[in-house]
Image (spheres, helix red, strand yellow):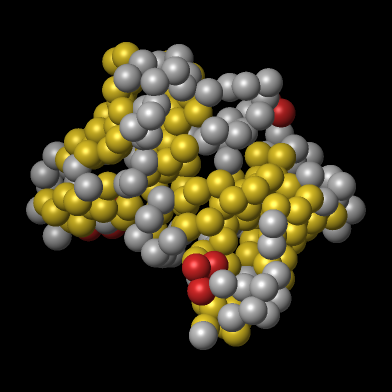
Amino acid sequence: RKEVEQDPGPFNVPEGATVAFNCTYSNSASQSFFWYRQDCRKEPKLLMSVYSSGNEDGRFTAQLNRASQYISLLIRDSKLSDSATYLCVVTPTTDSWGKLQFGAGTQVVVTP
Amino acid sequence: DAGVIQSPRHEVTEMGQEVTLRCKPISGHDYLFWYRQTMMRGLELLIYFNNNVPIDDSGMPEDRFSAKMPNASFSTLKIQPSEPRDSAVYFCASKRRTGGSNYGYTFGSGTRLTVV
């Protein structure tokens, strides 16, 4: 079983709609959680961290469910520019600080 | 801030040849990471350094791969001899440790390696 698993998609989303997707992780001791965004043929870039209490950044909302070991990302009012691959990222444990484990990514395609 | 700089951007080489990828981290960052990305395996951590010292190289696929960081502003990843299955995008990333946070983890633009 992979340590970080994501639905690869693609999620085809009409412009202006809402899309949400999850990521599951296998290590219950995982410490930190992030969503990265990667555009086609570009490098990954940090989108947002995921806090236990949930957090918002504009149209983006991230949630963490430690009991079920998943994190989620919700995008409201989707824009064409939101088309990208969204990578779920986990820092395994405190003694492996700095090591990020990446999921394979969820592709989102926003259509006009 | 010029960001993490990688060179070359693209590399096409023949099987058996030596390939050297280069990375200049962001000034002041004390961690440097080498990742490899393929369609099949996604992003894989190969090795990372802290203050120029290799900390974890468990992701290096085999002895054909080696990485060095002779100083705080330069690192290389070498493949010798190269094989077609090494074809991938290789990313370098750097960060500065700030209270244990993983903020400021910046990737370079990557080197797209094709081994024919």
* Residue at horizontal 31 percent and vertical 55 percent from the top: B88
Does the image show residue A100?
A: yes
**In the figure, residue A19 lies in which quadrant?**
bottom right
A52 to B33, vertically: above or below: below
Relative to A110, A22 lies left or right: right
Residue B43 location (% of width, % of height): 47, 51
A50 to B46, vertically: above or below: below
**View extreme (right): residue:** A67
Relative to A51, B27 lies left or right: left
The quadrant of the rendering that contains the N terminus of chain B is: top left
Does the image show residue B47?
A: no
Residue A24 location (% of width, % of height): 72, 59
B26 to B105, vertically: above or below: above
* Residue at horizontal 25 percent and vertical 33 percent from the top: B22
The quadrant of the rendering that contains the C terminus of chain B is: bottom left
**In the figure, residue A20 lies in which quadrant?**
bottom right
* Residue at horizontal 44 percent and vertical 61 percent from the top: A39
Residue A51 location (% of width, % of height): 79, 44
Relative to B77, B93 lies left or right: right
Q: Nearer the viewer, residue B6 or B17?
A: B6
* Residue at horizontal 51 percent and vertical 85 percent from the top: A112
Residue A86 location (% of width, % of height): 57, 61
